[in-house]
Amino acid sequence: MYMKKISLFILVYIIFWSQLYAQTSTTSTVPDKPKLVVGIVVDQMRWDYLYRFESKYSANGFKRLLAQGYSCENTQIPYIPTYTAPGHTCIYSGSVPALHGVIANNWYDKKIEKSIYCTDDARYSSVGDSSIAGKMSPVQLLTTSICDELKLANNFKSKVIGIAIKDRGAILPAGHSADGAYWYSGTSGRWITSTYYRNSLPKWVKESNDSLAKNYKMNDTWKTIMDLEKYSESTEDNVVWETPYRNEDKPVFVHNVKALLDLSPDILKALPYGNKMTLDFAKNAIKGEDLGKDNITDFLTVSLSSTDYIGHQFGTNSVEIEDTYLQLDKELASFITYLDVTVGKGNYLLFLSADHGAAHNATFLQTNHIPSGNMLLDSMNRKISQYVLTEFKDSNILYGLCNQEIYLNHAAIERNHLNVEDVKTKLIKYVKGINGVMNAVDLANLSASTLIDNLRTSIENGYNAQRSGDIYIIFQPAWMEDFTKGTTHGSSFRYDTHIPLIWYGWNVKAGKDYSEIHMTDIAPTIASMLRIQEPNGTVGKPILGLFKK
C-alpha cells in the first residue's frame, strides 16, 4: 500500500512538471518581438462593411481577422476634415493635423499664395518612369511616424517599406527615414518611387513592373463573383446616382476592363484589380527586401486605394462596392496565408484599419425620405466672393474656400484699413444663411463658439495655425461637398469617422472592445507592444484591452 502511494506521488510529480515544462516551452516559442509589423489601411472603408457583407466573406479573410483577432468596434477619428492624407498620417503618427501639419490632401499656402499638395516636393524626381508623379517626399510631415521611431530605437537596423496606389498612402505612413516608398503611376502603368529614397528601382520592383506590363493576370471584364441577384445588400445595378466609366453609357455590369485599360493604365486605380495588384506587390516586397527574416523587427505599410476610387464613383450602396469588398476579402485571405508561410504564424503583428469612411449619396437618401443635400463648392465660392466684393469693396481680401475653410488675405484687409475680426464676424453671419450650412466658426477663437464639445475638439484637432484657414464651415448632417453622384467624405459625422480596427497575430488574443478608441491610439499601441518610444507628436494612448491576458 505504501509503495502504491509512493508510485502515485511520483507519477503525479512527473505529470505536473511535464505539463509545466510543456507550457514553458510553448510560451518560450513566442518571439520577444514580432519579426514584421504589417499595417493595412483600406481607403474609405466604413466600419459597417465588416458586418454588412459578412455572410458572403470567405473563412480566411475578414472573418478570420474578426474571429481570431482583437476588434476595436468603436474606433473614431478625432479631427476634421476626414481625408486620405491626414487619415494615414494620424494612424502612423498617433497625432492630429494640429501637430503633424498634414491638414488635408491639398491646402492653401498663405506664404506663397497658392494651393499645395501634401507630398509634392520639386527637389526630387521620379524613379521608374519619366512622369512628374515621383516629385514627392514626406516634407510636409512635421512629426515622426511609428516607422521612424522603430528605426530610431535600433539605430536604423529595421527595414521600413511603404506601398500604395496613391503616393500619399505610401509616403506618409512610412515616415521620413523609410528604406522605400512605392506608388502606382497612372501615366506609365508602373510602380515608381522618388529620388528622395533612392536613384534606381530595386530588382524586385523592376521584375514586378515587368510582370505587370507583360503577363499580369486580369480578366477582360469585371464580372460579379456571384450572381447579380444575390447582391441583396446593394441597390439596383443601374441608378442615377452612380457614375459610369468613360467607355460606358450606363454604370452597370459587366464592365469592359480591357477597353478601359486601352484608354489609360490609370483606370486600374478604380477597379478591384488595383487591390490585388497592391497586395501582390506587397508580397514581392516581403520577398525582395527579406522583411521579417531576422530578429530585428521590420515594418510594411500597405494602403489599398481602389476601394476609395470605386466608392467615390459608385457610392456606398452599389453592387460595385459590395463586389469590390468580396474580391478584397479573397485577396486578404491570400495575403495573410502568404505571411503565415513566409514570416510564420505568430511572428508577425498585423492591424487593419481605414483612413475615413463615406457618406450615403444625397439623392439616394432623399429617395428614401432622409434629409440630405449637396454643397456645390463653385457656387458657394461665387456667392462668398460676391458678398466680399459687395460688402468690403475688394475681392482680394478673400483667398478662397478650401477644405470647408475660408482663407482670408490679412495683408489685403490691412491695406483696406479694415478690421480682421469685423470681416470674420460679417462673413460668418453671411455663410450661416447659406442653405445646407449648419454653422460657421472663427478658427482662431473656437473657445467663444457654442459648439458641442466633440465637434469643437474635432475642429481644434484639425486646425494648424500656419496652414489652416480663418473660418470653418460646418455642413448639415448628410450634406456633401459636390459629388452629386457616388460619394465623398470629410465631415465629423459618424459615417465618416467610424472606422474598423482589427489587430491580429503576434501576442494578440481574440476579442472585441466596445469602448471608444481613437485612430490616434494605433501608433502608441504599437510603440507599447514593441517597447519603443511613441512618435514625437503622439496624442493617443495605448489600447489597454490588447494587453490584458
Image (cartoon, helix red, strand yellow):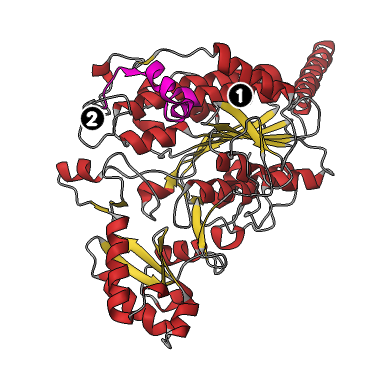
Instruction: Determine which residue is flagged by label 1.
Output: 281
Q: Which residues are magenta?
A: 251-274
Residue at the image point whose x is 23% and y is 37% from the top: 241
Q: If the image is split into quadrants, where does the N terminus sit? A: top right
| Of labels 1 and 2, the one closer to you | 1
Neighbourhood count class around disc 1 (C-alpha, 10 Å): few under 14, some 14–19, many 20 upward:
many
Say above or below: 393 vs 43. below
Count of numbered marks = 2
Residue type at the position of mark 2: Thr
269 part of magenta stretch: yes
Q: Is residue 373 left or right of residue 81?
A: left
Rendered location of residue 306, percent (x, y): 46, 31
Neighbourhood count class around disc 2 (C-alpha, 10 Å): few under 14, some 14–19, many 20 upward:
few
Instruction: Determine which residue is flagged by label 2.
Output: 235
Q: Main secondary structure of the magenta part?
A: helix
- Rendered image: mark on residue 352: none
Which one is nearer the viewer's eye here, 293 or 513?
A: 293
Say above or below: 467 vs 531. below
- In this view of the protein, can residue 507 be seen by the observer? no
- In this view of the protein, can residue 212 be seen by the observer? yes
